[in-house]
Image: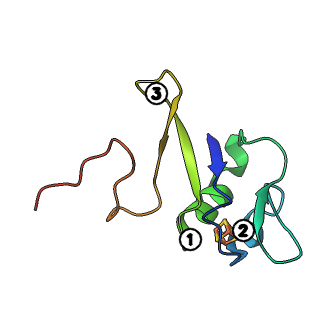
Amino acid sequence: MKIKLDRTLCDGFGICAKYAPEHFSLDDWGYASLAGSPVIAPTDEPAVTRALLDCPVHAITTLSDHTGPDGKPAATRTGSPAAPGPGERKPLP
Ligand code: SF4
């Protein structure tokens, strides 16, 4: 599992650092940044996934193994089933 944190979206709630302090650090104003590698060991995935799912602004995303049209890894959102990520389709009613 590889993650990305969009600091422009972070609103400083601090939830990520509460669940996975070894992977997220907060600055003096409570805004998060990745601490260390964005590659998450399988043993840490539950805590990081909890942080990802509970981030109120969906600033944390996973990077899939699939590549987009530009050849770069495509980011996928797994935080909200109601809001599809890039390249995802909203299910039909
Ligand atoms: S949970 Fe989300 S909004 Fe809160 S500090 Fe972490 S990244 Fe920022």
The relative height of residue 42 versus residue 77 in the rendered view (above or below) is above
Q: Quadrant of residue 27?
A: bottom right
Please give the residue where the numbered disc 2 appears in the rendered image.
19
In the image, is the residue at mark 3 within 8 Å of ligand 1 by its beta carbon? no
Between the residue at mark 2 and the residue at mark 1, the CA separation in whole angstroms equals 9 Å
Outermost residue to the right: 28
| Contact (Cβ within 8 Å) of mark 2 with mark 1 | yes
The relative height of residue 31 versus residue 64 in the rendered view (above or below) is below
Please give the residue where the numbered disc 1 appears in the rendered image.
54
Image-based side of 28 in relation to 78, left or right: right
- Quadrant of image for the C terminus: bottom left
- The percent coordinates of residue 28 (x first, y second) are 89, 75
Image-based side of 38 in relation to 71, left or right: right
Please give the residue where the numbered disc 3 appears in the rendered image.
66
Instruction: Identify the element where label 1 is drawn.
Output: helix
How is colour applied across the structure in the image?
A: rainbow
Instruction: Identify the element where label 3 is drawn.
Output: strand
Q: Amino acid at mark 2?
A: Tyr
In the image, is the residue at mark 1 within 8 Å of ligand 1 by its beta carbon? yes
Which residue is painted at 69% across and 74% down in the image?
15
> Which quadrant of the render holds ligand 1?
bottom right
The relative height of residue 85 versus residue 53 in the rendered view (above or below) is above
